[in-house]
């Protein structure tokens, strides 16, 4: 009769199984909300002029044009609708621009052009700007 305890063997088996499952099973990473994905600096080339936009957490966007000029605006984005509603109110202005934007599957930012006071576009039909993330 073997008096050896089976406890070490069982502990080894449980530990080995747990480690194997940890390495094999996919880990779920919580998705990043689109509001967070928007934050940072994006750029595009428009008529040979580099334009950079920086979305900040305090709901301010800074637009830097190739000539060094910087404009700021308050922004609001509603990602609960598709395409997302994007509202801009430039500093010192009373009128806001209502337009749309999307974060593309390729990781780009597309914004539809619009004028203050004009109705919000419902699709990306008119002139759009395609930005690439830089920071």
Image: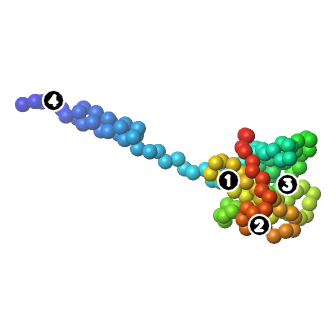
In percent of width and height, residue 53 lies at 80, 47
Q: Is residue 47 rendered to the left or right of residue 8? A: right
Distance between the alpha carbons at the discs numbered 2 and 4: 77 Å
Write down the residue under mark 1.
Answer: 103
Q: Label for residue 73?
A: 3
Labels 3, 4: front one: 3
Determine the residue positioned at 49% across, 48% down. 28
The crowding category of the residue bearing disc 3, from other C-alpha atoms within 10 Å (few below 14, some 14 to 19, many at least 20), is: some
Kindly state the secondary structure of the residue where label 1 is placed. strand
Vertical comparison of 17 with 97: above or below: above
Labels 3, 1: front one: 1
Vertical comparison of 11 with 122: above or below: above
Distance between the alpha carbons at the discs numbered 3 and 1: 20 Å
Distance between the alpha carbons at the discs numbered 3 and 2: 20 Å
Write down the residue under mark 4.
Answer: 4
Vertical comparison of 97 with 4: above or below: below
Q: Determine if residue 124 is in view.
A: yes
Labels 2, 4: front one: 2
Write down the residue under mark 2.
Answer: 121
In the rendered image, the residue lying farthest to the bottom is 119
Kindly state the secondary structure of the residue where label 2 is placed. loop
In percent of width and height, residue 59 lies at 78, 54
Counting residues from the N terminus, which is met first, the one under dot 3 or under dot 2? 3
Labels 1, 4: front one: 1
Residue 1 figure quarter: top left
Determine the residue positioned at 92% across, 41% down. 67
């Amino acid at each position: 009769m073997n008096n050896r305890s089976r406890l070490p063997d069982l502990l080894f088996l449980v530990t080995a199984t747990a480690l194997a499952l940890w390495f094999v099973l996919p880990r779920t990473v919580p998705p990043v909300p689109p509001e967070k994905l928007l934050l940072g600096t994006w750029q595009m080339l428009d008529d040979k002029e580099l334009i950079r936009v920086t979305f900040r957490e305090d709901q301010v966007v800074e637009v830097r044009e190739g000539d060094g000029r910087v404009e700021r605006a308050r922004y609001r984005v509603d990602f609960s609708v598709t395409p997302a509603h994007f509202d801009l109110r430039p500093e010192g202005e009373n009128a806001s621009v209502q337009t749309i934007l999307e974060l593309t599957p390729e990781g780009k930012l597309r914004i539809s052009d619009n004028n203050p006071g004009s109705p919000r576009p419902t699709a990306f039909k008119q002139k759009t700007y395609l930005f690439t993330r830089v920071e």
